[in-house]
Image: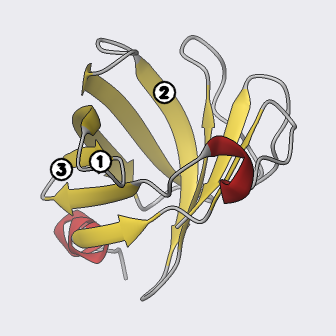
Amino acid sequence: MEKDPQEEYEKFSGLWMQISCNPDGMDNPVENYGVIPTVKFTNNQFVVTSATGEIVIEGLFSVNPYAAPKEIDWTDTFGEDAGKTFPAIYEIGEDRLVFCAANEGMKRPRGFESKIGHTLRFF
């Protein structure tokens, strides 16, 4: 039985706290990159906010729950990378979201590992 894409978007719905970010193969725990950002998902939109309440990134996302691993594309519409789309893979559960995104123009990651050009994030 195929998954309903709308049900997949509903799994993202709400506020998520980032607990780890590992860019370009480097372990980068919260203590090293400052305040813990949050991401609010509504339908296919996301807003990343710093602990001080500043919106740092906004964008849209689309999922392909039929792929293995599941695929997601992040398109920033506001922030430092506005206009860029990042191909990624993800896993999501009731209280855990993990995704690995490639830099714009790179091939989509095939595994959940941080390496040059990839960022692994845990929420």
Q: Nearer the viewer, residue 42 or 87?
A: 42
Residue 6, compared with residue 78, is above or below; it is below
Where is residue 48 drawn, in percent x and y?
31, 45
- The residue that appears at 35% across and 47% down in the rendered structure is 50
Q: Nearer the viewer, residue 23 or 28?
A: 28
> How far separated are the C-alphas under marks 3 and 2?
15 Å
Tell us which disc is closer to us: 1 or 2. Answer: 1
Residue 80, compared with residue 66, is above or below; it is above
Q: Residues within 10 Å of mark 1 (few under 14, many from 20)?
A: some
Q: Which mark is residue 21?
A: none
Would you identify the image quadrant in which residue 81 lies?
top left
Residue identifier under label 2: 86
Where is residue 3 drawn, in percent x and y?
33, 74
- The residue that appears at 71% across and 56% down in the rendered structure is 31
Q: Residues within 10 Å of mark 3 (few under 14, many from 20)?
A: some
Q: Is residue 7 left or right of residue 56?
A: left
- The residue that appears at 41% across and 37% down in the rendered structure is 73
- Mark closest to the chain's N terminus, 1 or 2: 1
- Mark closest to the chain's N terminus, 3 or 2: 3
> How far separated are the C-alphas under marks 3 and 1?
17 Å
Q: Is residue 31 left or right of residue 66?
A: right
Return the residue found at the far bottom. 94
Would you identify the image quadrant in which residue 77 lies?
top left
Q: Which mark is residue 44?
A: 3
Residue identifier under label 1: 49
Q: Nearer the viewer, residue 122 or 63?
A: 122
